[in-house]
Amino acid sequence: MKSLALSTFLFLFFSQGALAAYCETFSSINETHKLCWNDLHKAWLSEACFKKTCDSQQFLKKTHKAPPVQDLSGGRNPSAMVCHGLKLTLVILKDGKNNEQSFCQFSDNSLTDANAIERVVK
Amino acid sequence: MKLFIFLALLPTLVFANSCDYKNLITASDSPFDKIPVYDQDGANICYAFTAAQLLDYELIKDGLSSRSIHPAWVALKDAANINKSEISFGSSRRAIEALMNDSNCHYDLVAKQLGVWAYKANVKEAELLRFLENFTNQYKKTGSFQVAFQNGLKTTADWCPPHATFKNLIPELENLAVFATTPILTKLLMPKCEEFKTKLPLRKPHMVNNEGPNFSKNILKHLDQKNSPVEVSYCANFWQEPSYQGRLSSSTLDLKSDCFMHSSLVVGKRMMNNSCQVLIRNTWGNGWNKTNEKWNCVCKHKSTGKFEDNCSYSTHNNGQYSVEACWVGEDLLNNNSHSSVILK
């Protein structure tokens, strides 16, 4: 029994570590955020989410009702519009090569990418 | 006799080669190394994002060291040129022509100036632009600053975070004393831009309407002959619904009423399973999302910089790759496009 508990603990410990293996700094004019890749959710999450529970991670664990269909005219980014539809703060951040990506920010300031949010709304 | 056979076969040979491999992103010393993948968020100025990239590509190819054109500047010049009060829904060709007759305000300077207002309102650039469009539309209807501001807030609230503080912009808006997006942005940007703006050597744009199968052939030809991207205006619905056909018939330019018009760059071509595909560079960020997960794409490894020419959602969605552009069938381009723009 003890060995089962220990192996479960070790599995969870190392798998969580592996999930956060790849981290990157994203920035805008006045903000810098360190985000890490979560392979379970296939999502970027604030680094803090790998140390303690955060709203972003909690959101990705369940499927949510999609917000009303947003107007995509003029080439608006569909994932970003889901984030706007959920009344979350939309943050455009740049990676080290200046490539841009939409992130949704929750009330605890944790971030996850808008693409991941879009995948859990139906 | 041999010459006669060769001449008879020449058109076939040329046609057969028209979809030979070309990839402007992975080409050595590609200007795209210096032009990031954009994310236009909720701003409906796709035409400006695409025009900015098209111009930056040519300028860098001609020797400029970095990207210099901000999409919001392109949108502003387009609207100002035709005395349009809003910046939404413009034209890439018209915007480029407007920039040819005017000067450029460098990307960093525009971003900094817009950033001042966005910071005050505690929102992002796209949300600021959306609010300005809503507020000024309301002003046009009511003629009252107070009513327009309140209604502008209400109509922006459908996709703005609760902590937005647009009220902080009231003194600025009252001080400018203009109530349409184009003059507001002009007054916001010009004091600094006037000081630093530069004239750029831009090439003339040329627009071609989609009048049948030759539409894509001309795009492929331009890629081959000029090694330059092509802007296409098209119904973006097919990204999520691959069977979607936006054009009502091949003989007219009419599009379905549910078509979401968008603008992107065609940056490559290849033969795949005996059919021609074109490479499209979008402005919806560099990650995998519901619109590109169905397609094979060109990805760049973030650490090594190595390109993967045929990456897919199932194998490359691991945070280590940047999605640079995606391959779609040439037929989709013909069935969904309205027109294209090249630089002469």
Image (spheres, coloured by chain):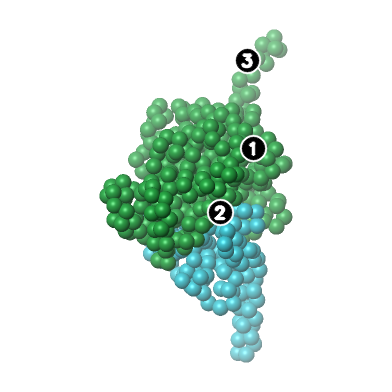
Residue A66 seen in the current view: no
**What amino acid does circle 1 point to?**
Leu
Q: Earlier in the sequence, mark 1 or mark 3?
A: 3
Are discs 3 and 2 located on one and the same chain? yes
Which one is in front in this view, the residue at disc 3 or the one at disc 2? 2
Task: Tell me whether the residue at label 1 lies in contact with that at label 3, contact meaning CB atoms closer than 8 angstroms.
Answer: no
Q: Which mark is residue A71?
A: none
Q: Which mark is residue B112?
A: 2
Task: Tell me whether the residue at label 3 lies in contact with that at label 2, contact meaning CB atoms closer than 8 angstroms.
Answer: no
Q: Nearer the viewer, residue B112 or B72?
A: B112
Q: Quadrant of residue B316?
A: bottom right
Q: Which residue is mark 3?
A: B8
Crowd around label 1: few <14 · some 14–19 · many ≥20 (10 Å): many
Distance between the Cα atoms at labels 1 and 2?
Answer: 22 Å
Secondary element at image label 2:
helix
Q: Nearer the viewer, residue B284 or B319?
A: B284
Secondary element at image label 3:
helix
- The colour chain A appears in is cyan
Q: Which residue is mark 1?
A: B59
Residue most extreme to the top: B1
Residue B132 percent coordinates (x, y) = 40, 52
- Judging from the image, mark 2 belongs to the subunit labelled B
Q: Quadrant of the N terminus of chain B?
A: top right
- The colour chain B appears in is green
Are discs 1 and 2 located on one and the same chain? yes
Residue B80 percent coordinates (x, y) = 45, 38
Distance between the Cα atoms at labels 1 and 3?
Answer: 40 Å
Q: Quadrant of the C terminus of chain B?
A: top right
